[in-house]
Each structure stands twice: as C-alpha cells, then as structure tokens.
C-alpha cells in the first residue's frame, strides 16, 4: 500500500466528484444502516458507477452476513471490501474466498495491546486499517467518530508493515499523523465534513493536498 488517500462515507454525486477531482485513490461507500453516511443499494450502485475507472471503490461493512455482502457486491461491484466490525480471522478468510475481492480488515486502537491481534490476520487480510477504538458509549458507531488515537502507539511497529491510518484525521492534522506514524495510506470521513454525513468539497481537496504534500517529505 503506497501513498494512498481514501475519502470514505461519500453519499452524493457532487461530493464524490469532489473526491475524484481532488485525486483520491480510493473512495468509500458505507453500508451500515446506523451510519449517517449509509447509502442504499440503488444510490451505492449509481455512485460506484460514477467512480469506476477513476478510483478504487471500497464498500464498508460491519459484521455483515453473506446476504448483505452479496447484495453490496452485486450492486456496487467494489474493488475492495472494508470490514469494520468484529470479524474473526476465519470470517475474513471466508468472506475473501466467497466474494473473490481483496479485504481490508480494520482494527480499533486505543492502547499498545490492541496491536497484538494483527498477527492473527497477517496471512488472511490483504490490507490493514488502523482506526481509533470507538468511545465506550452504547450509541457510538464502530467508526466514523472523528476521534484520533495516540499515534505514538504505532512508532514501534515493524517499518515493513503496510497499513492505512484513520481516526480523526483532517486537513490540519494529516501531515503530522503521517510524519509520526510513517503511514503510507490515510483515510478520512468526519474530518472532511460540515456535519455528520455531509461532506465538504473544499475540505476534501484540502485533505488530499495536505496528505500528498506530507507523503512527498522523505522519511528519515
Ligand atoms: O463513517 C462511518 O459512518 C462509519 C460507520 C461504521 C464504521 C466505520 C465508519 N467509518 C470509518 O471510520 C474510520 C474513521 O472515520 P473518521 O475519519 O474518524 O470519521 C474511517 O475508516 C471511516 O471509513
């Protein structure tokens, strides 16, 4: 995973166009009914067609069953499945085998011990996404909360480990996040919004620019 920028939770043709025009490498569509960014299958299909050939299309799922995944795969034809729930290694392997798409498994990070679980997925998931652990309140979403975690937790990771970073990133902090963590890929949702679920084209462009500039700085 090399120098990639993902804009997630796109739900209108206009904001998707802003992400594509800004040069996002990946665009994400949320299939999780409790999210303010959830797209139904008809809208997801339309947006995915708009992005085809211009960016990698990612469908975000949370502990989805096979029927829900099949519906999303058929309608959105994603290039990548983002699994943002509590999917076990066995479940990730089964999804990958059944649906024939690369899988990005998400891990919620709040303390160093949360990184230990990555090993169990290393031969199974195609990509890792490290996100903040959701706050311990019943109504919290599993992601998309706009909360960063302590990026210093990642400084001890094997530098060869490739991961995407997310959680509370925005145009103002993404450069520092990349510098500290040496992430080669970043993902944002809330940080390019005006309010939950409403993306801002100006913030999208600023985020992509800031991330690209930070990636261009040589790693010492
Ligand atoms: O965006 C959502 O609504 C969402 C819902 C359920 C699971 C994950 C979700 N978003 C993902 O969460 C991370 C961090 O988002 P943020 O930038 O902190 O808002 C990101 O990977 C989103 O794709």
Image (spheres, rainbow, N blue to C red):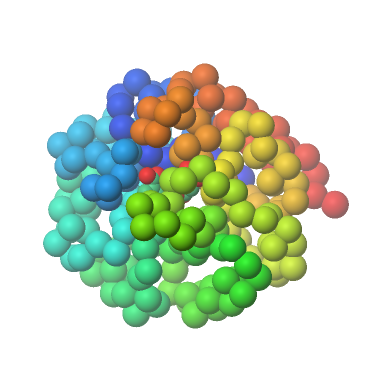
Q: In this view, does 11 lie above or below 32?
A: above
Instruction: Out of 182 and 166, give the one closest to the viewer.
Output: 166
Question: Where does the N terminus fall, quadrant-wise?
Answer: bottom right
Q: Which residue is drawn at 49% across and 64% down?
A: 107
The percent position of residue 2, horizontal first and vertical second, equals 60, 50
Q: In this view, does 15 lie to the left or right of 75?
A: right
The percent position of residue 7, horizontal first and vertical second, equals 46, 38
How many labels sit on residues? 0
Q: Which residue is drawn at 38% across and 28% down?
A: 198
Q: Is residue 121 left or right of residue 114?
A: left
The percent position of residue 74, horizontal first and vertical second, equals 17, 50
The answer to whether residue 138 is visible is yes
Q: In this view, does 179 lie above or below 95?
A: above
Q: In this view, does 173 lie above or below 31?
A: above
Instruction: Out of 42 and 108, give the one closest to the viewer.
Output: 108
Q: Which residue is drawn at 35% across and 52% down?
A: 139
Q: Quadrant of residue 116?
A: bottom right
The answer to whether residue 82 is visible is no
The percent position of residue 177, horizontal first and vertical second, equals 68, 46
Q: Which residue is drawn at 54% across and 73% down?
A: 118
Farthest-out residue, right: 220
Q: In this view, does 106 lie above or below 124?
A: above
Q: Quadrant of residue 15?
A: top left
Instruction: Out of 122 and 146, give the one closest to the viewer.
Output: 146
């Amino acid at each position: 995973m090399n120098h990639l920028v993902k804009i997630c939770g796109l739900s209108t043709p206009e904001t998707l166009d802003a992400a594509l025009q800004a040069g996002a490498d990946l665009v994400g569509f949320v299939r999780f009914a409790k999210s303010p960014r959830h797209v139904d299958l008809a809208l997801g299909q339309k947006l995915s067609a708009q992005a085809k050939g211009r960016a990698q299309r990612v469908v975000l799922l949370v502990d989805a069953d096979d029927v829900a995944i099949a519906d999303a795969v058929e309608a959105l034809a994603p290039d990548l499945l983002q699994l943002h729930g509590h999917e076990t290694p066995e479940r990730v392997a089964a999804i990958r085998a059944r649906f024939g798409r690369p899988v990005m498994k998400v891990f919620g990070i709040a303390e160093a011990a949360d990184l230990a679980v990555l090993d169990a997925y290393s031969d199974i998931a195609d990509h890792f996404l490290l996100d903040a652990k959701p706050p311990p309140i019943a109504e919290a979403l599993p992601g998309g909360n706009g909360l960063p975690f302590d990026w210093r937790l990642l400084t001890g990771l094997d530098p060869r480990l490739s991961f995407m970073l997310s959680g509370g990133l925005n145009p103002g902090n993404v450069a520092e996040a990349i510098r500290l963590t040496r992430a080669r890929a970043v993902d944002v949702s809330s940080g390019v919004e005006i309010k939950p679920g409403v993306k801002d084209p100006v913030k999208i462009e600023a985020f992509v620019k800031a991330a690209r500039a930070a990636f261009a700085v040589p790693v010492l």
